[in-house]
């Protein structure tokens, strides 16, 4: 595997899930695979889980790890070609990428959507520059439009906790005070469409996800109706994807004070099939979900985060195997 962005990059999902189970049973099984190999993790944005779980995954495989926080000590990087660099950015990505790649074997990138230029974000401009100019395998640690390590961990978690062969999984929008990217819901939708689940998306009108990710998934605008009989509830906020009105891209369409009935609470959970609650974290209590729901025994947020180590170990293992 040379690049990890979309569900197809992993090939057969059943096989990938079998590998995840194998690694969870013995996470050091492939500790010789990464000997004398170096993973470079480049963060343009904050992170708790991705930073820790991906380092742990690389160590499980015997790799060395270098972490770079671009905005905390590195030169500020220009990402667009053709600009006159007279601002606060001292270095261009076009030099920085080949330099960084000379010190490592595999590179992970966290680079969120800017949420101002839809075309720039949806072309995965930053990620693709790394693919093009590094000559190394590149994987997404949440890029402008996707967060596949999260979606893979989510799928592993659903597989571990499902009680029926084909569970009903509901992705629900929930309120948030700041405009957030669409990467998490995009990837979750993409992966659920590829998995064997009954998948429903619910959100207020105007928040329609890009069809490249939502595919033919059922959209139900009535949140209570969507929750009926759900086995898994996956909450997440996202800003306007700009599908129906491109001029609204990256915006919050209605002030969150008016949207608080979308906060996942016992009211909605009551109509589910004793659903498990999921969220990628970090989560704002009282906005996305109530204390009661996230603290209930049905909440999976901690095992879900723990599975980030497993998804990252599988992905890095695949990349190391390709390089051998
Ligand atoms: C980010 C997002 O919504 O994409 C990261 C989630 C993993 N969340 C925040 O910025 C709060
Ligand atoms: N879920 C997730 O990616 O969390 P971090 O932003 O803390 O890495």
Image (cartoon, rainbow, N blue to C red):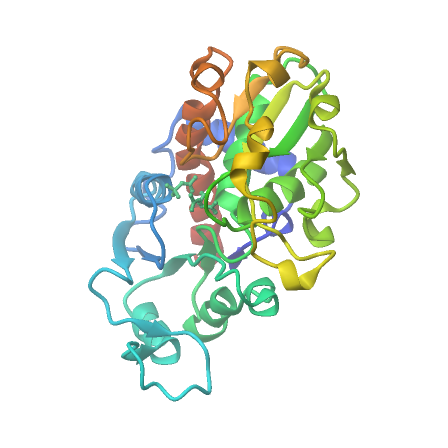
* Quadrant of the rendering where the C terminus is positioned: bottom left
Residue depicted at 56% across the width and 56% down the height = 250
Q: Is residue 13 above or below residue 273?
A: below
Q: Is residue 280 left or right of residue 92?
A: right
Q: Is residue 175 left or right of residue 285?
A: right
The single residue placed furthest to the left in the displayed view is 73
Residue 55, compared with residue 262, is above or below; it is below
Residue at 55% across, 51% down: 146
> How many marks do you count on the picture?
0
Picture coordinates of residue 136 (x, y %)? Answer: 43, 66
Q: Quadrant of residue 158?
A: top right
**253, above or below 308, in the image:** below
Residue 93 in view here: yes
- Give the x, y percent position of residue 14: 64, 34
Q: Residue at x 27, y 62 (%)?
A: 71
Instruction: Residue 62: give x, y in percent of width and height.
Output: 29, 44
Residue 134 position within the rendered picture, expressed as x and y whole percent measured from the top left: 41, 71
Foreground pick, 41 / 272: 272
Where residue 69 sits, quadrant-wise, is bottom left
Depth check, front residue: 202 or 8: 202
Against 275, residue 235 (above or below) is below
**Quadrant observed for ligand 1 in the rendered image:** top left
**Residue 175 seen in this snapshot:** no
Say which of 4 and 314 sits in front: 4
Q: Name the image quarter holding residue 228.
A: top right
The one nearer the camera, 217 or 177, is 177
């Amino acid at each position: 595997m040379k690049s990890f962005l979309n569900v197809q990059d992993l090939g057969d999902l059943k096989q990938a899930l079998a590998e995840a189970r194998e690694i969870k049973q013995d996470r050091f099984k492939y500790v010789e695979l990464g000997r004398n190999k170096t993973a470079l993790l480049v963060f343009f944005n904050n992170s708790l889980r991705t930073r820790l779980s991906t380092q742990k995954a690389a160590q499980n495989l015997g790799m060395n790890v270098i972490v770079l926080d671009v905005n905390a000590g590195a030169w500020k990087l220009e990402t667009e070609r053709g600009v006159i660099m007279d601002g606060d950015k001292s270095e261009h990505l076009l030099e920085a990428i080949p330099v960084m790649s000379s010190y490592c074997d595999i590179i992970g990138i966290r680079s969120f959507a800017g949420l101002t230029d839809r075309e720039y974000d949806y072309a995965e401009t930053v990620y693709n520059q790394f693919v093009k100019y590094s000559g190394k395998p590149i994987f997404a640690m949440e890029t402008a439009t996707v967060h596949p390590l999260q979606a893979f961990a989510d799928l592993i978690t659903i597989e571990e906790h499902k009680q029926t062969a084909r569970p009903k999984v509901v992705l629900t929008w929930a309120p948030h005070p700041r405009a957030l990217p669409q990467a998490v819901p995009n990837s979750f939708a993409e992966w659920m469409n590829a998995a064997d689940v009954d998948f429903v998306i619910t959100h207020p009108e105007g928040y329609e996800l890009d069809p490249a990710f939502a595919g033919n998934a059922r959209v139900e605008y009535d949140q209570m109706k969507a929750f009926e009989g759900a086995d898994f509830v996956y909450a997440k906020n996202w800003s306007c994807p700009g599908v129906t009105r491109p001029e609204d891209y990256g915006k919050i369409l209605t002030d969150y004070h008016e949207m608080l009935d979308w906060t996942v609470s016992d009211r909605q959970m009551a109509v589910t099939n004793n659903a498990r609650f999921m969220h990628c974290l970090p989560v704002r209590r009282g906005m996305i979900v109530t204390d009661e729901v996230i603290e209930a025994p049905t909440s999976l947020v901690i095992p879900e985060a723990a599975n980030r180590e497993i998804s990252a170990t599988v992905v890095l293992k695949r990349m190391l195997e390709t390089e051998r």
